[in-house]
Amino acid sequence: MVPPKTEPQGDQALYDLIDRTIQREGRFPGDMTLFLGGMLISGTPISEQEFFARLEQMSRRTDQQELAEVGRETQEEHGGDGNYIHLKNARVFGVGPVQMIPLWRGQLSEVKGWYAGWATATGEQYGVYAT
């Protein structure tokens, strides 16, 4: 059972921008960079439904059915509350070399700032090299 949607805890403008765009367009038309916990996280915003669908697909491909089951249970128990932001094709800056991760989910209340677009960094200290 999906609980009733609550007001998001965090930046209401960020939530509204992503939520309304995804509802209207079916997808977010670009990328976003988030500032939180001393890190930058860049990626393409996706809906919660797409996040869990992709998580299930990934778990099937890697033969981790328990991950798919936990994902389904989590969505059923906590889905749609508006307190999380979901990214695909994410890059995490600030924890050593840039980490590439296929899916990321974070609490909206932890986002301290954001801008539309990718974070751009090159250089050995960031683990990113210009070609």
Image (cartoon, rainbow, N blue to C red):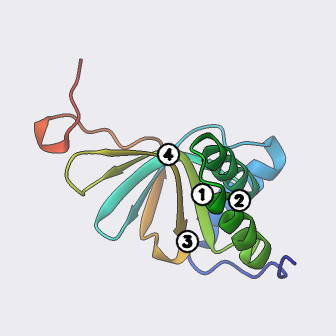
Residue behind mark 4: 43
**Mark 2 → mark 3, Cα distance in angstroms:** 13 Å
Horizontally, residue 7 falls left or right of residue 67, namely right
Give the mark nearer the N terminus: 1 vs 3: 1
Amino acid at the residue labelled 2: Glu
Name the residue at the top extreme: 131
Amino acid at the residue labelled 3: Leu
**Mark 4 → mark 2, Cα distance in angstroms:** 14 Å
Give the mark nearer the N terminus: 4 vs 2: 4
Q: Which mark identifies residue 48?
A: 2
Residue at screen point 76% across, 78% down: 77
Secondary structure under tag 2 reads helix
Residue behind mark 3: 108
Horizontally, residue 85 falls left or right of residue 41, namely right
Mark in the foreground, 1 or 3: 1
How many numbered marks does the figure carry?
Answer: 4
Secondary structure under tag 1 reads strand
**Mark 1 → mark 3, Cα distance in angstroms:** 9 Å
Nearer the observer, 67 or 105: 67
Q: Say if mark 4 contacts mark 2, CB within 8 Å.
A: no
**Mark 1 → mark 2, Cα distance in angstroms:** 6 Å
Nearer the observer, 53 or 126: 53
Compared to residue 100, the image places residue 114 above or below, namely below
Give the mark nearer the N terminus: 2 vs 3: 2
Amino acid at the residue labelled 1: His
**Mark 4 → mark 3, Cα distance in angstroms:** 15 Å
Residue behind mark 1: 86
Residue at screen point 76% across, 82% down: 6
Secondary structure under tag 3 reads helix
Horizontally, residue 86 falls left or right of residue 122, namely right
| Mark 4 surroundings within 10 Å by alpha-carbon count, few (fewer than 14), some (14 through 19), many (20 or more) | many
